[in-house]
Image (tube, helix red, strand yellow):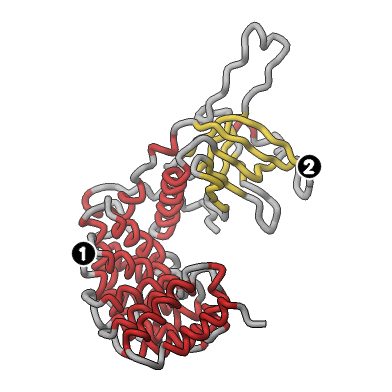
């Protein structure tokens, strides 16, 4: 039996193409509202809403219903893979790219950017945008300056595109994006646009020598590394944490320890000092808590795959469990090279902390270290008369 929600969705879809213009607009707004509610996404999708809304986009950038349809599609795409699959089959990328031609003054272009930002999570989507000619208008929207929302959304889409294969990275460079991105970096490092520009440049540089050369030629490496070095003071102070270790490789036995941790932004290390348990004379003179900065503290290499999550606003979690079950790679002190490592760090939880700020600083540090690796073959010491800290050529970044 058809539910009331499904019945309403079908009625709204039918009204998109019949009746007076005001009725059609109200139907579009109703579908947009339903698309924004997780419980109603399936009803809109099964009522043929994706195909109908995409057809509405053919009405032109100036039509108010086009704007509503683009917004509804972006709502449907969020957390609904089935809707995104339908959009792919109906060439949503090409239709949304066509709206970008209206320029920064168009609300339809603005809504199209929102949808394209979501529809770039797969390589096939990225290539569809490339084939539809979407990169040049995205670069043109970057030129609105660091304080424009269009610039921010265009940079977000380009960042996703630049994370794709080499044809996409080359196309972004050939469209003239690198010089514009460098200008955004230099304009105001405190703006979101600068942060997004840094992401685009990072993605463009990874694995692409031509893009790295273009970034250096545009004078972009120094401001890029400078921006990524900001906020690193949050990482160096000792913070309370809990560590979870596995006793040996392949073991299911885990041991929890409390202690302190901090990060070494220069080397890309996590430093950990477990709390010493109270001894026999602990009631007389409790043992001193070791500092994670001391030479005897455990050090772990962060330049490999790890997952960083925020369970809540006061907690940051680093998870090192991977397919090979090796955990974090420990860096042993010179005097301890002969000592056998008896446990592996699987997870580290930092609390209390400002999780979002700490995560941002940590991700900047890792991004900077990866970039230093990518640019290690350039003669960078002469740029702007300052030496760059390219010290990590032997780190195995995976």
Q: Quadrant of residue 335?
A: top right
Camera-side mark, 2 or 1: 1
Picture coordinates of residue 92, whole percent (x, y): 44, 84
Tag 2's secondary structure? loop
Near-viewer residue (130 or 146): 146
Picture coordinates of residue 244, whole percent (x, y): 67, 40
Whether residue 97 is visible = no
Q: Is residue 96 above or below residue 340?
A: below
Say which quadrant the N terminus sits in: bottom right
Picture coordinates of residue 78, whole percent (x, y): 49, 69
Q: Residue at x 57, y 80 (%)?
A: 6
Residue extending furthest toward the bottom: 18
Q: Residues within 10 Å of mark 1 (few under 14, many from 20)?
A: some
Tag 1's secondary structure? loop
Whether residue 327 is visible = yes
Q: Residue at x 22, y 52 (%)?
A: 384
Choose the circle earlier in sequence order: 2 or 1: 1
Task: Compute the Cα span from label 2 to label 1.
Answer: 54 Å
Q: Is residue 60 left or right of residue 343?
A: left
Q: Is residue 214 left or right of residue 10?
A: left
> In the image, which disc is placed on residue 253?
2
Mark 2 and mark 1 in contact? Answer it, CB < 8 Å. no
Labels in figure, total: 2
Q: Residues within 10 Å of mark 2 (few under 14, many from 20)?
A: few
Q: Residue at x 44, y 71 (%)?
A: 33
Picture coordinates of residue 182, whole percent (x, y): 26, 62
> In the image, which disc is placed on residue 145?
1
Say which quadrant the C terminus sits in: bottom right
Residue extending furthest toward the top: 284
Q: Is residue 55 left or right of residue 296?
A: left
Q: Is residue 99 above or below residue 144?
A: below
Q: Residue at x 47, y 86 (%)?
A: 13
């Amino acid at each position: 039996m058809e539910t009331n929600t499904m019945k309403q969705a079908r009625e709204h879809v039918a009204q998109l193409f019949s009746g007076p213009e005001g009725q059609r607009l109200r139907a579009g707004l109703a579908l947009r509202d339903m698309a924004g509610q997780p419980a109603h996404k399936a009803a809109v999708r099964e009522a043929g809403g994706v195909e109908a809304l995409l057809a509405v986009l053919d009405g032109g950038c100036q039509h108010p219903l086009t704007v509503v349809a683009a917004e509804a599609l972006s709502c449907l795409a969020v957390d609904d893979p089935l809707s995104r699959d339908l959009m792919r089959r109906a060439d949503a990328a090409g239709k949304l790219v066509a709206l970008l031609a209206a320029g920064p003054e168009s609300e339809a272009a603005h809504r199209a950017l929102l949808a394209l930002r979501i529809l770039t999570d797969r390589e096939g989507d990225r290539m569809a945008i490339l084939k539809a000619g979407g990169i040049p208008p995205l670069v043109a929207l970057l030129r609105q300056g660091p304080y424009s929302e269009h610039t921010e959304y265009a940079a977000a889409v380009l960042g996703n595109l630049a994370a794709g294969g080499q044809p996409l990275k080359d196309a972004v460079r050939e469209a003239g994006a690198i010089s514009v991105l460098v200008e955004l970096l230099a304009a105001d490092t405190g703006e979101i646009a600068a942060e997004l520009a840094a992401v685009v440049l990072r993605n463009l540089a990874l694995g692409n020598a031509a893009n790295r050369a273009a970034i250096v030629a545009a004078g972009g490496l120094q401001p890029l590394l400078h921006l990524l070095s900001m906020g690193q003071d949050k990482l160096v102070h000792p913070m309370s944490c809990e560590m979870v270790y596995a006793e040996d490789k392949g073991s299911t036995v885990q041991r929890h320890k409390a202690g302190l941790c901090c990060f070494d932004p220069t080397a890309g290390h996590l430093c950990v000092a477990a709390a010493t348990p109270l001894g026999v004379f602990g009631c007389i003179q409790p043992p001193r808590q070791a500092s994670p900065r001391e030479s005897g503290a455990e050090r772990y290499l962060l330049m490999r795959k790890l997952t960083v999550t925020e369970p809540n606003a006061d907690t940051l979690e680093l998870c090192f469990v991977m397919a090979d079950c090796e955990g974090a790679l420990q860096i042993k002190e010179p005097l301890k090279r002969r000592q056998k490592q008896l446990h592996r760090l699987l997870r580290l939880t930092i609390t209390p902390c400002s999780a979002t700020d700490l995560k941002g600083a940590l991700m900047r540090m890792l991004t900077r270290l990866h970039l230093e690796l990518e640019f290690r073959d350039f003669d960078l010491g002469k740029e702007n008369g300052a030496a760059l800290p390219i010290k990590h050529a032997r780190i195995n970044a995976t």
